[in-house]
Every structure is written in structure tokens, then in C-alpha cells.
Amino acid sequence: MAQIHRDLTISGQVSTFPQRNRFAGEQKCSYPARSSSLPDRRRRHGLPQAERERRLPEDSLVEILARVPARSVYRSKCVAKAWRDLIEDPLLRKKLPQTLQGFFFIDKETHRQRVRFTNLLDRSGPLQIDHNLAFLKESPGIGTLDFSDSCNGLLLFEHKLKAWPYDLLGYVVCNPTTKQWAEVPRDGPPLPLYLRHPKRYNYLVFDPSVSSHFHLVQFTWEFVRLVKFEEELVVGHDDDDEEEEEGDEEEELSRTSVHVYSSETGKWTHTQSDWSQIQSGWNKHDLEGWRLQGLIPESFCCAVLNSMLHFIISDEGQIAAVDMQGVTRKIIPVPTMAERLHWLGAGYVAQSQGRLHYISQAVDGRLSIWVLEGYDTQEWVLKHSVSFTELFREKRRTGDTKDYSVVAMHPDGNVVFIVQDWNRKLISYHMDNKLVSIMGTLKNDASDVHVVPYVPCFSESPALENKH
């Protein structure tokens, strides 16, 4: 039976979860704030010259720690005070891997734009993250911002006019830790009027260990009516009042085009198929077939792994891997056992500990976590499974609908973060010891709030030219 720890209500703009340090089930390690520089601390420690010479140079130690997983680095802070000072030094931590700091809670309603943050790491020093994104709100020229995605310390917003929020101006990418931001232009003119109900799915891809630049990947879904007129396919307009001639053939088709922006080049590139090339079906050997059929990402959840964007394709039970040129490189079927269990809606795809994970909820409420052990062989292994009763210590409430939503998986540990739909509580579930920790309560329903996991990036990026 899972263990449950006490509740902490998210009532202010910044909340701190005092019982856990990084992972549920681990002992907290809290130290006072520091303001002295690293040389000052060396003199204060007063180590003998012979002992200092026997020790590993700190530059070499930092290079070693930079290659160690974030989980091991943060555990090392508890070894000794000197280790803690080294790892937390403001100048050196830019080179060290970071872990999950907390969650942003961003309202989906554009006219409110309320932003809150809950801190998972209990530190006595001041929080260096701009928890309500004041640096953006105070910047001139910023209108209405709609949250789209986040990746490795950066946040992506759609930028719109305040007076007319449906008119897209472009995008804003920002770093709440360094208070840097940059505007990204819209890709070309507005979509033609004959495209019915176009939809955009925007994703942010950023890996500071590879490059200081970022990419935006945008999938645009378009739907039109085609009329075969005198042996030619003609795009029909919705407002076309002319009557169709007898014998004209009409067909409605959809397609999904992909657009990629690179902060290094400052340009958009796009891949789009002519309407006459749209296919009526596709198979796993046709990697781009999902776009030609007009399929779209199932949801906005995604995972960045091997410098590629991974997301679930709608209605297909498959995961697409798209590179930064907009090319689909791999189609990965979801676990076959998961398909037989009849999941409630789409699953959740995440990157944790360098591997792709697939999480979903069965009709009976059981939560299952799969890990892709063989990326090339597409071998899924069931990592963990827990029943609804074990997870929440009570019976299901809604029968054949979802009782909870997975909102994140810890990037460095076997921890899943869940929002309970009936009471809006945000909880963490530790797979290793089945420990459940109640982290807080959302003010609004989960469907009205973006729950955004945040891993800080302390390095300033030349791609973000504006600084508050």
C-alpha cells in the first residue's frame, strides 16, 4: 500500500514543498545561504598546503561532475560542506547538470495570465527564478501571451494583440532564471481563408548540453474541400456561393505541414505537400504518411531525446520522432500490451534518465509506466504498474472516465506527477518505494491550468537577445 504524506496548499504565488528535497522518499538536505566567493571559502577552510596539492583540482572536478547525472550530483551535496559549496557556486553551476526545480502553474485563459510557481527544492536562500514572469510583463511591446511549451529551462508563448488575441503576432521564448527573452516572428502571412479551422501545435526544442540555440517545431493542420472540375482538382472556398455543376466530384481532405524555426539562422523552413499528393492511408513504412493523411499530435505532451521531438500521433497508437529539419525519422508503436488494455484516451510520453517512457491509464484506473529499452529495436519493457486503490487508497469515482491526469515524469528519477481530477491535488508517486506525496492543491481545475515542470538553466544564451 502506498504511503501518503501531508498536504501543502498552493495558496500564494510561490510555494515550497518542505518534506522532500528532490525525490519523494529521499531525506532532505538543507543548508544556509552563501554569499562568499570560492577563493574566500578556500582561505576560510585553511587546508594544509600538502593536503591541497593531493586533492583533485576543482576545474577538473567540475568537468567530471558535468558528465555525471543530475541525481548523483545533487546527492553529492550531502557528502561534505566543501562539496556542497562547489556544487552550489553560482559561477560553476552553469556547467553542472540541473534537476527539476518545481512547477509553473499558468492559467489557460488569456485575459488573466496568472502565473504561479511551486518550489520542490527546499532552499534557505532566495528563489532565483522569476516565479510570476514579471520581467516579461514589464517589457515594452509585449501583448497577450499564451503558453505553448517548455524545454530545459526555456518557456514558449504565442504572442498576440491585447485588443484582438486571435491575431498571432509571433512567439516569445524566455528563460525565467536569467530573465532573458527573444521574439520569434510568425512564419509567413496568415493562413488563407479557405482553410477551415486551421490548428497549430507548437513545440520548443532546446538542449544546452548540445547548443545554446533553440528550435521551434510547428505542425499546422489544414482542412479543405476539393472539387474535380474539368479533370483538375480545384480548392473550393467555404464562402463560394456558386452552385456546383452536375457531375462535379467533391472531396474533403486534410494535411499537416511542419514548420521549423532555428534561432541560429533566424529563419523558418517548412515542409508541405500539394493537395493533389494527399494520401488516403499510410503504414509504418511510410514515415511521412501521418502528415499526408492529416493526422496531428494527440496532445501537447512531448519528449526531447536524441535531439529529436517525440509525440503521440492522434488515433494511431504510435509515437513519431521528428528531427530539427522537420523530417520524421522514426515511427514507434506504443506497447502492444497497452493497446490490449484499452487505455482511457491518449497516453503520456516523457523522457526520464535518458530514455523514452510511455505512461497511460487503463479503464480500471491502473497506471502503467513503460520504458523503451531498445530505441533501435523498439523494445518496450513494463517498468511499473499500480492500481487505482494502491495509488489513492480509495475506490474510483467516475467509472469509465479519467479520474486523474499525468502531468510530468521526473527527468532524473522514477517519479510520476499526477493531478487528481476530483479534488485538484497535485501528487508525486515514487515507483521505487510506492511513496505518495501530496504536493499541493490547484486553485482551478487541471483543464484550466498548464502544469509546467521546470528545470532551470543558469547559462545565458546569445539566442535570447533581450534581458530585463
Image (cartoon, rainbow, N blue to C red):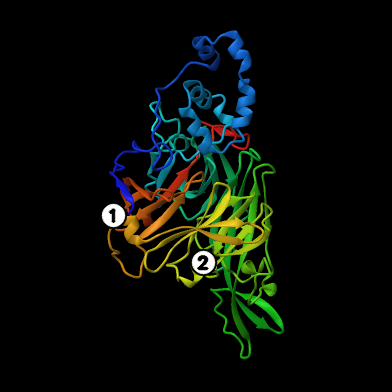
Q: Nearer the viewer, residue 275 or 189?
A: 275
Residue projecting furthest to the right: 231
Mark 1 neighbour class, 10 Å CA radius: few under 14, some 14 to 19, many 20 or more: some
Q: Is residue 5 above or below residue 467?
A: below
Q: Report the quarter where the N terminus lies.
A: bottom left
Label 1 sits on a secondary structure element that is loop
Q: Position of residue 270 (x, y in %)?
A: 67, 57
Label 2 sits on a secondary structure element that is loop
Res. 190 visible in picture: no
Q: Nearer the viewer, residue 296 or 160?
A: 296
Q: Position of residue 135 (x, y in %)?
A: 46, 34
Q: Nearer the viewer, residue 45 or 208?
A: 45
Q: Quadrant of residue 11?
A: top left
Q: Would you name the residue on which mark 2 appears?
A: 197
Badge nearest the viewer, 2 or 1 = 1
Tally the numbered discs. Answer: 2
Q: Residue at x 54, y 13 (%)?
A: 42
Residue projecting furthest to the bottom: 246
Q: Quadrant of residue 60?
A: top right
Q: Position of residue 4 (x, y in %)?
A: 30, 48
Mark 2 neighbour class, 10 Å CA radius: few under 14, some 14 to 19, many 20 or more: few
For residue 423, which numbered disc appears in the image?
Answer: 1
* Residue type, numbered disc 1: Asn
Q: Position of residue 263 (x, y in %)?
A: 64, 43
Q: Nearer the viewer, residue 463 or 309?
A: 309
